[in-house]
Amino acid sequence: MRQNKGEITALLGWSLQAIEAIDKMNRPYVVVGPPEFQGFADTYGIQLVPWVFDKLDDRCEELYKKLKNLNTKVAVPIYEETVEWAGALNARFFNDPLIFHKSMLLRDKGLMKRKAQLAGIRVGVFEEASNKEDIRYFLKRINEALCNIDEADYSPIHVKPFDKAGTVGHYMIRSLKDIDKIDDSEFPLLMESHLEGQEFSCEAFIHNGKIRFLNITEYVKLGHSNFVPASPSLEKWRPQIREAIEKLVDAFEVKYGIIHPEFFITQEGILSFGEVANRIPGGHIFEHIENAYGFSPYQGQVLCCDPDTTEEEIEAFFPEEVVSAKGYSGNLMIYPNVKIVEKLKIPNNLKTHPYFINHNMFIPITSKVAERVGYGNHYGTIFFFGEDADEMRSLLKDYETYNFYE
């Protein structure tokens, strides 16, 4: 790949996968990450600016000066908590204050839904909650509108933090009793109506305001299992999905980088917007993209974040969507159903299945299982690869409720 003339790319957040990917590009880079990784960085020759991502208003100028002295030209966000930092830094690197303000829209779930709604994108009903009484009122009013009189027939609502990634702090509220599970310290929260249809995510690589590669990730169960590319039954809606993402790109004025929006789609093809992120997705999705398509999405993100990347480089890097995939790459994230872990049990039928690749499950040092936050923290992942989407989906569903930990 083209040398970057000595100008440095800053990775915000510590990710060995991202570091290894950019290192292979022969591209000067610096990692801005936790101070505790300094020893590792020194051992392996990784240039590190030790940093704690807090107090943006007070310390952004300090970080900007450090990076500018290193001849840094662009900041690439790795994690949710670094998105606004990248926005603030790039606003200075490119002398465009709007870059920061646009990044804030992609960090606040309430603001992003309002922005999407103003752009004519279909969203559910949503409001902000300051306390439990707000949630009770919202739950009742949503179900009154749906003519659900009996609480046993209530349609659920969802509450979640404004700025957390994935399912962290996400609660599904089906009854008034569920509201009591939320600690007062978690407010304020976003409340939203339940959207019908199949949930899925997209990973759109954007350069110069155009979608250069669009992946669709099929969720088998939110927070538990997914695979790439999506099955033919979901991929048939790609034209409508691409059109919706183009609306998002225009509405949020995304010029460079990646976006990770989530949608719901009904059997009739009606799309509803869930939320959008501006960083690497969770759920091992980047790993699945690389397994299926053979290119590094981490490198794709770096190329797309750089305004100087040429059209020729973009065209040479990204393969053709869907048809160039070598198969389906999927995973199942495992959550213990016990309070104390004593042993790990993996059935022979799973290990001998032709789609089984490997797993990283483990017996934790502390046998007591940590309390779940929202949907919970998984204790390992099982990885699969195969040629048939229906078999992949069936496999993930079959082991969804299996008790791997006893």
Image (cartoon, rainbow, N blue to C red):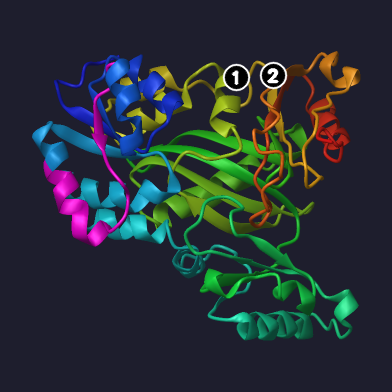
**For residue 4, what is the image quadrant?**
top left
Q: Amino acid at mark 2?
A: Gly
Give the labeled residue for mark 2: 327
| Residue 323 rendering spot, x and y as whole percentages | 63, 21
Dot 2 alpha-carbon crowd within 10 angstroms: few under 14, some 14 to 19, many 20 or more: some
Asked if disc 1 and disc 2 are in contact, CB closer than 8 Å, the reply is yes
The numbered dot on residue 361 is: none
Would residue 258 appear left or right of 32 to someone viewing this image? Answer: right
| Residue 232 rendering spot, x and y as whole percentages | 75, 33
**For residue 24, what is the image quadrant?**
top left
**Quadrant for the N terminus in the image:** top left
Q: Earlier in the sequence, mark 1 or mark 2?
A: 1
Query: Residue drawn 16% across and 45% down?
Result: 64
Give the labeled residue for mark 1: 291
Task: Give, as a single range, the part of the protein colored magenta.
Answer: 45-65
**Quadrant for the C terminus in the image:** top right
Is residue 194 depicted above or below 286 in this figure?
below
Q: Is residue 57 magenta?
A: yes
Q: Is residue 164 magenta?
A: no
Q: Amino acid at mark 1?
A: Asn
Query: Residue drawn 33% across and 53% down?
Result: 84
